[in-house]
Image (cartoon, grey):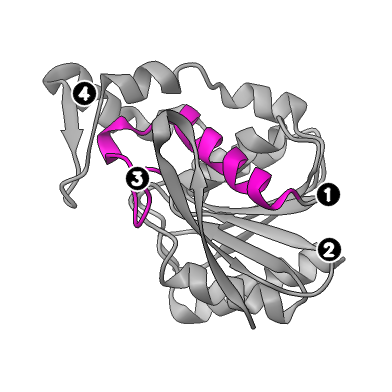
Amino acid sequence: MAETDHRIPVDDGESVAAVHHEAPGDDWLVFCHGFLSDKSGSYERRCRRAVERGYNAVRFDFRGCGDSDGAFVDQTLSSKLADLAAVVGQFDPASYALFGSSFGAKVAFHAAVRDVRVGAVVARAPVTYNRAFDEYRTAVEREGEYRFKTGDRIDRRFFDDFARYSFDTVERSLAVPVAIFHGTQDDSVDVAHSFEAASQFETDVLLETFAAEGHLFSSAAEERLLERTFHWLET
């Protein structure tokens, strides 16, 4: 199984780091990591499993994360969408599916209404509605920034950009099938948001909850997630 590293240029002379897990054929699956995450760990396993199922798989770091250029505080939803578009442009598949975790799923949803080549969206513990970030917004309005336990921070620029993206637009415009997998004990993103989104989409939706799982899935749940994901994509 060949795994090829890429440096992909984006805006302002910066670049993002991506890894292409190669497979024969024309099926592609692009992975978008979560807000305080990167392309390592679970994404390596997911990509290797994707190759076993015949998919060319791509994982990458958004700017400000992992091996990509940029500072975390400078990233926005707009910059993440630009990063994803640059990564897809590097490989230029005729069609592809998106897999996003947490905030990466929000990126995937908004990207899918922009690019007609997206054939399906898989979302794990997805951030859908902007109100999921209300706690951070309140802190930024009060203090000027919010600093996470990791030391990463966001400021008003993030929320000025965030306000440009309403999930209502995704609900009305998304025309490809969606699969949502969400833990019932998620204390970061309320599983009720996934139920609400699923009821509002005007496309086919699979929604499965994982009992007793939180925002991060256990190894056993991750295994079930992958099996369900590939079964759904293939059918």
Q: What stretch is highlighted in magenta?
A: 63-92
Task: Identify the residue under disc 4.
Answer: 140
Mark 2 touching mark 1, by CB under 8 A? yes
Q: Name the residue under label 3.
A: 69
Residue 206 screen position, x and y as percent: 74, 54
The answer to whether the residues at label 2 and label 3 have Cβ atoms under 8 Å apart is no
What amino acid does circle 1 point to? Ala
Looking at the picture, does residue 80 appear above or below residue 18? above
Is residue 155 shown above or below 187?
A: above
**How far apart, in angstroms, are the residues tagged by discs 3 and 4?**
24 Å
Looking at this view, is 159 or 117 the one in front? 117
Quarter in which the C terminus is drawn = bottom right
Kind of residue at disc 3: Asp
Assess disc 3: are there few (<14), some (14-19) or many (≥20) residues with their C-alpha within 10 Å of its C-alpha.
some
Q: Which residue is drawn at 41% across and 34% down?
A: 13
Secondary element at tag 1: loop
Q: Earlier in the sequence, mark 2 or mark 4?
A: 2
Q: Which residue lies furthest to the left in this view?
A: 143
